[in-house]
Amino acid sequence: MRAFFAIDLPDELADGISDVQDGLRGAAGLRFTDPEQAHVTLAFLGDVPEETTGTETGASDEPTPKGDVDAAIEAGRRAVEEADVEPFTVGVGGLGVFPSMEYISVVWAGVDDGAAELARLHETLEERTAALGYEPDDHEFTPHVTLARMNDARGKDLVQRVVRERDPDVGTFTAEAVRLKRSRLTSDGPVYETVESFPLSG
């Protein structure tokens, strides 16, 4: 399964996410995320085996992660304990893009309040999952909520203008748990399901 660790946004912020997306609807080439599945990704694992398998003669030479889903769950539990973060307020607002304004692949809403706590959780999760064989991100952690992905550059000018001119305030919420999420691809786009939840207690 494809999996990642994240903090989910509550349902009451879905309308705020949708409102921000509405300002980008005229941009051709954008594929919007589902506001009801909005989240802040803390650590992306990629493909996680459902169970540990031994190396067999004639097996594929392609590398597989060392840790299965049970190991990922245990890593998440330990990482959240080590981060020692109590429930905290997360403020979502502002706009940005990855990787740059000239070459846009992702449009996102940013995080102001709560950024330090999110960075701490990201750090401990990456330390624990790297020990299992998962590759850490090769770029600086920027807490964000993905709004859309750009398939081509037709709507780039509009996106650039909106990002430069708008500073939306989506809202705030209290982060109370980190979740290990499964990403399941469907004809309507990815669907995210919670595999395990790790409450924040500090």
Image (cartoon, helix red, strand yellow):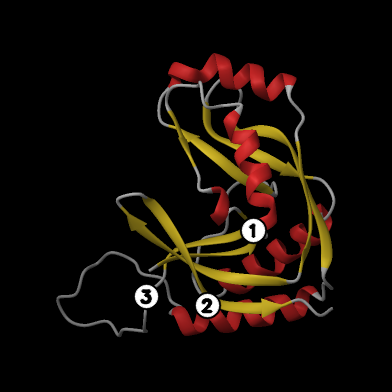
Give the camera-side residue of 39 and 84.
39
Q: Which residue is mark 2?
A: 72
| Separation of residues labelled 2 and 1 (CA atoms) | 26 Å
| Separation of residues labelled 2 and 3 (CA atoms) | 10 Å
Residue at horizontal 32%, vertical 55%? 186
Q: Are marks 2 and 1 in contact (CB under 8 Å)?
A: no
Q: Is residue 79 above or below residue 20?
A: below
Q: Picture coordinates of residue 63 (x, y %)?
A: 34, 66
Q: Which residue is mark 1?
A: 11
Label 3 vs 1, first from the N-terminus: 1
Label 1 sits on a secondary structure element that is helix
Q: Nearer the viewer, mark 3 or mark 1?
A: 1
Amino acid at dot 2? Ala
Q: Is residue 200 left or right of residue 191?
A: right
Label 2 vs 1, first from the N-terminus: 1
Give the camera-side residue of 115 and 57.
115
Label 2 vs 3, first from the N-terminus: 3
The quarter holding residue 62 reads: bottom left
> Which quadrant is home to the N terminus?
bottom left
Q: Which residue is mark 3?
A: 49
Q: Which mark is residue 115?
A: none
Q: Is residue 92 left or right of residue 17?
A: right
Amino acid at dot 1? Asp
Label 2 sits on a secondary structure element that is helix
Q: Is residue 50 above or below residue 144?
A: below
> Which quadrant is home to the C terminus?
bottom right
